[in-house]
Image (spheres, helix red, strand yellow):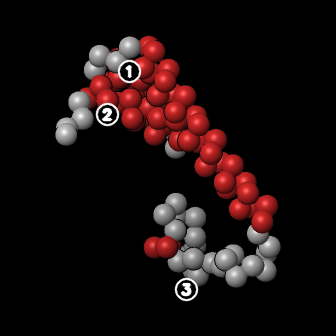
Amino acid sequence: MKLDNRIMELIAIGASITANCQPCLKSTIALALESGADKQEIAEAIEVGKRVRRGAGSKMDELVSSLSLTDPLVTPLRNEECACGAATESVN
């Protein structure tokens, strides 16, 4: 099954919200409209993105609350282990 441009842009709207990327959201809304999505579909995609973002944020909050600074899970990572690039290169 191949997704059409309208569906791809609606997915991108939700992903933009989940990623907290404002420029992406603005761009993908415009592209979704150009691809034939209507305002109701865009509103629904926005709501899905908001639910996913809230769920992910909630789980992160739970993890942060449960961690102890001496927890073995709280260890430095090498850059290649951290997708966001937050780890420093000086850590081996």
Which amino acid, mark 1? Ala
Residue extending furthest bottom? 92
Q: Position of residue 75 (x, y in %)?
A: 66, 79
| Nearer-N-terminus badge (1/2) | 2
Instruction: Categorize mark 3 by other alpha carbons within 10 Å: few (<14), some (14-19), many (20+).
Output: few
Q: Is residue 65 visible?
A: yes
Q: Quadrant of residue 42?
A: top left
Which image quarter is the N terminus in?
Answer: top left
Residue wearing tag 3: 92
- For residue 8, the mark is 2
Marks 3/1: CA distance?
44 Å
- For residue 64, the mark is none
Q: Position of residue 66 (x, y in %)?
A: 78, 65
Q: Residue at x 76, y 69 (%)?
A: 67
Which amino acid, mark 2? Met
Which image quarter is the C terminus in?
Answer: bottom right
Q: In this orientation, which residue lies closer to the viewer: 70 or 21?
A: 70
* SS category of the residue bearing label 3: loop
* SS category of the residue bearing label 1: helix
Q: Quadrant of residue 91?
A: bottom right
Q: Is residue 51 left or right of residue 61?
A: left
Q: Is residue 14 left or right of residue 66?
A: left
- For residue 30, the mark is 1
